[in-house]
Structure formats: structure tokens, C-alpha cells
Image (cartoon, rainbow, N blue to C red):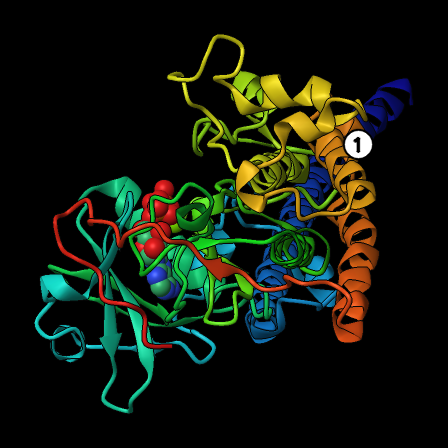
Amino acid sequence: MSSVNNNNNNNNNNNNVGMGEEAEAEYSRQGRVALVAIVAVASLALASLLLACSYYCYLRNKLSKLLRPNFPNNTTTTTTRNDCEDRDGLHNLLQVASDKGGVQVFTFKQLHSATGGFSKSNVVGHGGFGLVYRGVLSDGRKVAIKFMDQAGRQGEEEFRVEVDLLSRLHSPYLLALLGYCSDDHHKLLVYEFMANGGLQEHLYHRGSNGMPLVLDWETRLRIALEAAKGLEYLHEHVTPPVIHRDFKSSNILLDKHLRAKISDFGLAKLGPEKAGGHVSTRVLGTQGYVAPEYALTGHLTTKSDVYSYGVVLLELLTGRVPIDMKRPPGEGILVTWALPRLTDREKVLEIMDPRMDGQYSMKEVIQVAAIAAMCVQPEADYRPLMADVVQSLIPLVKTQRSISKGGSCSSFHAFRSPIPQPQLSGGAQQQAPEN
Ligand SMILES: Nc1ncnc2c1ncn2[C@@H]1O[C@H](COP(=O)(O)OP(=O)(O)OP(=O)(O)O)[C@@H](O)[C@H]1O
Ligand SMILES: [Mg+2]
């Protein structure tokens, strides 16, 4: 029995072994199936996630493109800004370069004929970008045409940024870009014509765009206010803010009524969306106008523009260039020379432009000097917002206008200076502006 039992046991054992192997095989097969299933489900989930992500990016891109033409004053652009973009630059703006919001594309031939074959007699200025010509389009519009002579990456980049930004930004205080020409050999920008050229031409009597004017106090205040409104628009009415980065008196252009508009956006940068933030970038701009912290660290904020604006206010007050090392020691750098005098009632009159011949209100001079002092202070955080500057200037300009209506003030318009018509740097004589 015992052997039978043993046999049975053996058989049982054998059976048990056989069943154990089968179970194990079955178990591991099920394990493999489960693993495959898990991998498949995970891959499917990952693929759907990727698909959803790309669709999300695509939708945001599309939405962003749709909203870009309304870029100014459009608060929704903050939330629709493409997360995949290069946050340090204008990459996203440049991606939508095909949508030029009313900006016309010209052929070289059209601009050639508008300027009389780029005749020297039509040259109205020469800047870092190249020569600037006066022109008349076939529809009769008077324009200024900038002809890029600076080949290379920087010039091309400035051209692209100028076109992309100006086709989206619209304000009465910004120069309007009417169109451009871009082929393999030429890059040209077409702007509305500003009959009185750059502000600096009238402040320093080095005009190249018609007869220089001596700007009276009221006109200077109005120009200060209009330029401030232009910067306020860039910093506070556009999302993300735009930092001009090359704000200076030669980039404030004056029309036939001496209304001021800000020009030259080639160096502009999109600012940080976060309040108090900065963008890190290489230092570009014009000597004498660059904020000290930006020059030292490359950290760019809207307050860098506020500093440059303060320098322009000093130019308006003093009629001096920001840097002139030919002046006596201590007077070469405008900010260093003027700053201690700006807040001293006794000394503030020392800095005033003698060409205004004392035709200003002392009270207003003190107020404008105080604004300038705040704008150029070395600590960026203590500089005002452009909206604050605008609010401080508005009453001054209004006061002037109400006096003007009452007729109790003799001079409210810029008057022609007796200075002879200047020679162009390129040698061409300027024609008096027609409008
Ligand atoms: N839209 C315009 N209408 C009339 N004149 C203009 C216009 N744009 C420029 N100019 C004239 O051309 C001059 C040169 O302008 P441009 O912007 O090329 O150089 P800039 O401002 O002197 O220097 P930068 O290249 O550093 O900006 C101006 O001072 C002005 O007289
Ligand atoms: Mg300029």
C-alpha cells in the first residue's frame, strides 16, 4: 500500500510538478500580456498627450496670429502669447511677418521713380541705417524713404524688427510706416514724411532737413508731452511692453505743425511680461542716452527708456547735446552737469537754453526740471513710469494753451532762426520742406 501510496504520491507529485510548471508558464504568459498591455496603454497615452500638446500649440499659434494685428491695447495677447517662442526676442512677432496690417510692399522701381532716381537733391538726412530721401508716391503721398546701406546681419535684423513692429503698433505719437521694399539687393523703408525732420536739428542748429527752428518753451513742452505719450503707449498700452532702446532727440521727428512722433524701432525689444522683470540682452543704443544699469549689466527694462527720455528732457531744457567733450571740464556729460542744478531753484536757470531768451515760466521750468531729475536718476526703480510723466506734463501744456487762447502770451510758436540753411553731411543742399 505504501508503495502504491508512494506511487500515487509520486504521481501526485509529478502531476503537481506538471501543474506547477503550467501554472508558472501561464502566469508568466499573463505577466507578459499584462506588460505588453501596460506598455501599449502608456504609449497610447503618451502619443495622445503629445498630440494634444501639439494641437494646443497649434491653436495658440493660430489664435496668436489672429490677435496680433490687434496687438496694441489688446490685453488678451498676454494670455495668447506663444509659450514655445523665444522669450528674449521678437521671434514670435517675426513669425507672423506675412501679416503686415496695411503696410504696403513696394518694388525698387516704384521707389526709384518716387525719389527721382534717388537724386542727391532729395536727400533729407543720413543715419546709421543709410541715406534718407524725400519722395512722392504715384498716388501723390509725400514720403520719406530710408535706403539701407549697411549690409550684414545687424542691418537686416533692424529692418525686420522695424517692419514687424511698426506694422502692428499704431499711435498718433509713433511714426507711421507706409511700406517697404525687400529684394535680394535692396532694403528700403517708406514712412510718412515729417516736414520738420529730427528734433535735434532744431535744438543744436545742425539741421539738415530745411531751415532749423528755434523752439519756444510751449513747443518744447508739447514735444516733451507727445514723446512721453509715445513711450507710454509702448510701455503701458501694449502687451508685452515694447522697449524702444534707442530713444533720443534724433528719433523724435516733427511734422509741419511741429507735432512729435517717435521713430526708429530697429533696436526695440519686447519687455518682460512680469512687472519689475528685465530682459537680458547685449547693450545697444546711443552713447549719452543709455541707462547706466543697462550699460553695466545688459539688463533691459522699460526704465531704460525712461532714462533716455530724461536725457531728451535735458536737451529740451538746455539745448545741449548729451555728450560734448569740447565743453569746459565738468560740463561734457549733460546728465552729470545738469543733475545737481535741476533740483536747485537758484541754479536751475543756469542750465536753460539761452536761445529761449528767458521766455518761460519759472514755475514750469522747476516742474519740468524735477521730472527730468527723476527720469535720469541712477537707481532705475526710483524712475517714474511714463504714465506718471505724461500726467505731470499734461497740466503744463494745458496751462500754456489756455493762456494762448486768452492771447496774454506773445510767443507760442516756434520761430524761424536767422541761421543760414545748413549744408548736408553728404554735400547735398536741402530744399525747404513743402509741407
Ligand atoms: N520720416 C521722415 N521724414 C522726414 N525726415 C526724416 C524722416 N526720417 C528721417 N528723416 C531725416 O533723416 C535724418 C536721419 O534719420 P535717421 O533715423 O536715419 O538717423 P538718426 O536718427 O540721425 O540716427 P540713427 O541712425 O542712429 O537713428 C533725420 O534726422 C531726419 O532729418
Ligand atoms: Mg533715427
Give x and y (percent) for residue 356.
Answer: 58, 45
User: Which residue is the extreme one toward the right?
Assistant: 1
**In terms of image quadrants, where is residue 430?**
bottom left
Q: Which residue is at the far top?
A: 329
| Image quadrant in which the C terminus is located | bottom left
Q: Amino acid at mark 1?
A: Asn
Q: Would residue 274 appear left or right of 142 to someone viewing this image? A: right
Query: Could you classify mark 1 by the number of other residues whose Cα lies within 10 Å: few (under 14), some (14-19), or many (20 or more)?
Result: few
**Depicted 5 relative to depicted 247: above or below:** above
- Decide if residue 325 is in sight here: yes
Q: To which quarter of the image does residue 163 belong?
A: bottom left
Residue at 71% over, 47% down = 360
The picture places residue 253, in percent across and down from the top left corner, at 46, 58
Name the residue: 62% across, 67% down: 71
Image location of residue 410, percent across then percent down: 67, 63
Q: Nearer the viewer, residue 345 or 235?
A: 345
Residue at mark 1: C-beta within 8 A of ligand 1: no
Residue 185 placement (x, y as % from top left): 11, 59
- Work out whether residue 366 or residue 359 is closer to the camera in this orientation and state it: 359
* Secondary element at image label 1: helix
At 11% from the left edge and 75% from the top edge, which residue is drawn? 116
Q: How many marks?
A: 1
Residue at the spot of label 1: 16
In the depicted structure, whether residue 11 falls above or below residue 131: above
- Which residue is found at the position 59% from the left and 70% from the top? 172
Residue 87 relative to residue 207: left or right: right
State whether residue 14 appears in this view: no
Q: Quadrant of the N terminus?
A: top right
Q: Among all residues in the image, which is located at the extreme bottom?
A: 139
Vertical placement of residue 177 versus 298, above or below: below
In this rendered view, identify the residue nearer to me: 310 or 318. 318
